[in-house]
Image (cartoon, rainbow, N blue to C red):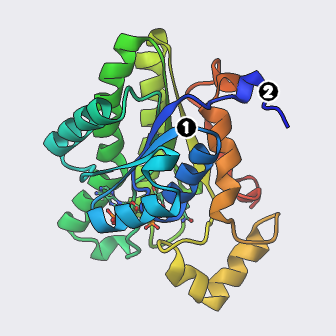
Amino acid sequence: MTTHPLFDIADRTALVTGSSRGIGHALARGLVEAGCTVVLNGRDPHALEKAAAELGGADAGVHTAAFDVTDGPAVAAGIADVEERVGPLDILVNNAGMQNRAPLLEFTDDAWRQILDTNLTSAFLVGREAARRMTERGHGKIVNICSLQSEVVRPGIAPYAATKGALKMLTKGMCADWGRYGIQVNGLGPGYIETELTRPLVEDEEFSAWVRGRTPAGRWGRTEDLVGALLYLASPAADFVSGQVLYVDGGMTSVL
Ligand code: NDP
């Protein structure tokens, strides 16, 4: 089987933040299978080594870079180290994120800052650091992992939705600022996907059934469902696509 040249990303180098597990790990696997050299990121070096081994390790072009994406100096050092050790980044996936379900009236100042730092500031810090280099080289693809909650919200997740809604606008702003340098910036918006982050919801049978009922596809998403959209957004096929959010949600954002 041949790959259409528009979808060929075999020689690219990619960094996926928050890829020790869950969606980030599945996206990294997809990039490895497409022939990319891939750098996994997270805060826990041991978890990263295990995650890299699952994808074939250094022999398969899989590397690790442990740093906290909310820590500006650590991000700057981390990106510099990745480019020196592995090579120039062609693709950045800003995926690291967290959830904190609590009523807004009970949400503390610290909890607010933590979710904002993890889900939004991280994309600014890592995106800026990568784009400083991509702009010099005149090309790059950045994909920010948004959410169906970039568009809609439910009780108890206002801070999360605020971060993801802002991430959508940051995506458009990065597109506006960096387009002239040959960088395309898009969002990928997952619906409800089974991962560690959503485990409490999956295990809540009533909520789980609500998700299945509200989703036109009639099921929860799987991490593999997101891979095709990422490969498209990272490929030459999307060279004139920028500032968009591609929702991969089984249709959920389209229905009441
Ligand atoms: P998981 O909790 O399973 O994984 C989160 C990943 O991010 C882990 O690898 C974690 O590693 C890493 N991470 C968290 N904080 C940091 C940090 N400060 N610095 C570096 N790495 C960090 O989450 P999911 O895979 O479910 O979610 C991934 C992304 O997808 C998130 O942005 C989430 O908001 C988004 N999303 C998820 C949906 C879902 O239904 N699951 C739906 C819509 C969007 P470690 O803790 O070791 O640092």
For the point 22% across and 70% down, the residue is 108
* Label 2 vs 1, first from the N-terminus: 2
Q: Is 256 situated left or right of 146 in this image?
A: right
Quarter-of-image position of residue 20: bottom left
| Disc marking residue 4 | 2
Q: State the residue at coordinates (70%, 57%).
A: 225
Residue neighbourhood size for the residue with mark 2, other residues' Cα within 10 Å, grouped as few (<14), some (14–19), many (≥20): few
For label 1, the crowd category at 10 Å Cα-Cα, with few meaning under 14, some 14 to 19 and many 20 or more, is many
Q: Is residue 18 above or below residue 206?
A: above
User: In this picture, is 3 found above or below 51?
Assistant: above
Tell me where residue 62 appears, x and y as whole percent: 45, 48
Residue topped by disc 1? 36
Residue most extreme to the right = 1
How many numbered marks are there? 2
Nearest to the observer: residue 90 or residue 251: 90
| Residue 47, percent from left and from top | 35, 67
Residue 235, above or below 35: above
Secondary structure under tag 2 reads loop
Q: Which quadrant of the rendered structure holds the C terminus?
A: bottom right
Amino acid under label 1? Answer: Cys
Q: Quadrant of residue 53?
A: bottom left
Residue type at mark 2? His
